[in-house]
Image (cartoon, grey):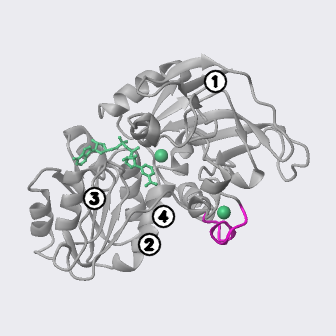
């Protein structure tokens, strides 16, 4: 089968032919219907060899959806042909965090060598994807896999961050979204669906800010050195009660803390190498700074239910597997609007 692999450190991903996997006992084989392309892969592919915690080559793609193609021995509760989404942050399934559905914070995954598909285990940018356990699958039902697949990360990750901040997002409050790409443009819609907050979106190009307005941002601000002052102006000097930074680079983290209100929730979701300095006087009084990772199994079910209610319209650009290397180049250069989704059987 065809797969898109990161094969050697620093090289561009390649389309290659690999053996189609067979499901072993307890596993499920999916025929991939759609796979989203996340900016985290760009970060992984920029790491030096010693920072990569898994062997290469790696089949990329950690947002996956498919139809059940074959069931391993002992798997029940699924039928061949079922349309499903993959919960990506696989854990051990039995530690205290996993027992609460928070496999993204599994206490034993690293020690046991359990890695998400596309981030250690073979990923979804392939014709078929092997899933280690049926608990990682959520039925899609009538949801279109093409627009639903980004919800497994570009939806789930902001959903988790926003849920933590919900108590702060009361009427009259302001939420700031920095970076309105794959995650950010879904975050804006989640904020509109879940909260009465005024949403202020920051990005660097007109095209991205236009998408932000289209999906529900009340205000857009160019992300530059004056951005925090503009947010303060828009909030009568108070600042934002919640700030979600989907870039996480040094200048955006500076903006994130500088535009926050007292008691704000500041969530640094992007992995752009920025760091907030937290101490008395460096952030507003009682502000909380978090660095969340992905989301829980139950939150994925909630996000998909929210999509089913019609509250989320993921903006997708679709491509074939052969186009995936070009998609990564476009994503790197900021030339994808919304989420790029690969259709391996198109
Ligand atoms: P994306 O490329 O689709 O979107 C990033 C957006 O940020 C683009 O619209 C880009 O124009 C904008 N941007 C770039 N520089 C900016 C700046 N200085 N100010 C404002 N906007 C700027 O990326 P994505 O797939 O949405 O991922 C966003 C970030 O989140 C990445 O760093 C990714 O690695 C990270 N991520 C983290 C988690 C997690 O669990 N913590 C999960 C998924 C993705
Ligand atoms: Zn991701
Ligand atoms: Zn666990």
- Magenta residues span 93-102
Query: Is the Cβ of the residue at disc 2 closer than 8 Å to that at disc 1?
Result: no
Query: Is the Cβ of the residue at disc 4 closer than 8 Å to that at disc 2?
Result: yes
Q: Residue at x 43, y 58 (%)?
A: 158
| Residue linked to disc 3 | 275
Q: Main secondary structure of the magenta part?
A: loop
- Whole-angstrom CA distance, mark 1 to mark 4, is 31 Å
* Vertical side of 38 occupied by 260: above or below: below
In magenta stretch: residue 207: no
The quarter of the picture where the C terminus appears is: top right
Q: How many marks?
A: 4
Q: Residue at x 56, y 36 (%)?
A: 35
Query: Is the Cβ of the residue at disc 3 closer than 8 Å to that at disc 2?
Result: no
Q: Nearer the viewer, mark 3 or mark 2?
A: 3
Q: Residue furthest front?
A: 50
Question: In the displayed structure, does residue 133 sit left or right of residue 154?
Answer: right
**In front: 107, or 285?**
107
Q: Residue furthest right?
A: 74
| Residue linked to disc 2 | 164
User: Measured from the top left, where is residue 51 in percent x and y?
Assistant: 45, 42
- Whole-angstrom CA distance, mark 2 to mark 1, is 38 Å
Query: Is the Cβ of the residue at disc 1 closer than 8 Å to that at disc 3?
Result: no
Question: In the displayed structure, does residue 217 sit left or right of residue 293?
Answer: left
Q: Nearer the viewer, mark 2 or mark 1?
A: 2
The earlier-in-sequence mark between 2 and 1 is 2
The earlier-in-sequence mark between 4 and 3 is 4
Q: Nearer the viewer, mark 1 or mark 4?
A: 4
| Residue linked to disc 4 | 160
Q: Nearer the viewer, mark 4 or mark 3?
A: 3
Label 2 element class: helix
User: Measured from the top left, where is residue 197 in percent x and y?
Assistant: 31, 71
Query: Is the Cβ of the residue at disc 1 closer than 8 Å to that at disc 4?
Result: no
């Amino acid at each position: 089968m065809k797969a898109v692999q990161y094969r050697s450190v620093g090289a561009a991903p390649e389309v290659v032919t690999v053996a189609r996997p067979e499901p072993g006992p307890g596993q499920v084989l999916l025929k991939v219907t759609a796979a989203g392309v996340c900016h985290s892969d760009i970060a992984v592919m920029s790491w030096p060899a010693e920072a990569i915690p898994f062997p290469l080559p790696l089949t990329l793609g950690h947002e996956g959806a498919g139809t059940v193609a074959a069931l391993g021995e002992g798997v029940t509760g699924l039928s061949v042909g079922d349309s499903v989404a993959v919960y990506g942050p696989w854990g051990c399934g039995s530690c205290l965090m996993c027992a609460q559905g928070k496999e993204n914070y599994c206490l034993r995954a690293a020690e046991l060598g359990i890695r998400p598909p596309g981030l250690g285990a073979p990923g979804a940018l392939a014709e078929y994807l092997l899933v280690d356990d049926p608990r990682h699958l959520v039925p899609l039902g009538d949801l279109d896999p093409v627009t639903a697949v980004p919800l497994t990360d570009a939806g789930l990750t902001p959903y988790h961050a926003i849920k933590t901040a919900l108590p702060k997002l009361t009427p009259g409050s302001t939420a700031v979204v920095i970076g309105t790409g794959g995650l950010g443009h879904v975050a804006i819609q989640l904020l509109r669906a879940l909260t009465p907050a005024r949403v202020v979106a920051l990005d660097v190009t007109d095209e991205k800010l236009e998408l932000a307005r289209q999906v529900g941002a009340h205000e857009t601000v160019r992300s530059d050195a004056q951005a925090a002052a503009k947010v303060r102006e828009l909030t009568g000097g108070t600042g934002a009660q919640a700030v979600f930074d989907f870039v996480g680079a040094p200048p955006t983290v500076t903006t994130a803390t500088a535009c926050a209100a007292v008691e704000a929730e500041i969530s640094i979701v992007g992995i752009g190498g920025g760091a907030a300095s937290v101490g008395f006087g460096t952030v507003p009084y009682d502000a909380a700074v978090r660095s969340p990772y992905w989301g829980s199994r139950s939150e994925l079910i909630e996000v998909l239910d929210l999509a089913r209610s019609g509250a989320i319209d993921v903006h997708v650009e679709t491509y074939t597997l052969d186009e995936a290397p070009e998609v990564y180049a476009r994503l790197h250069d900021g030339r994808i609007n919304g989420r790029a989704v690969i259709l391996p059987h198109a």
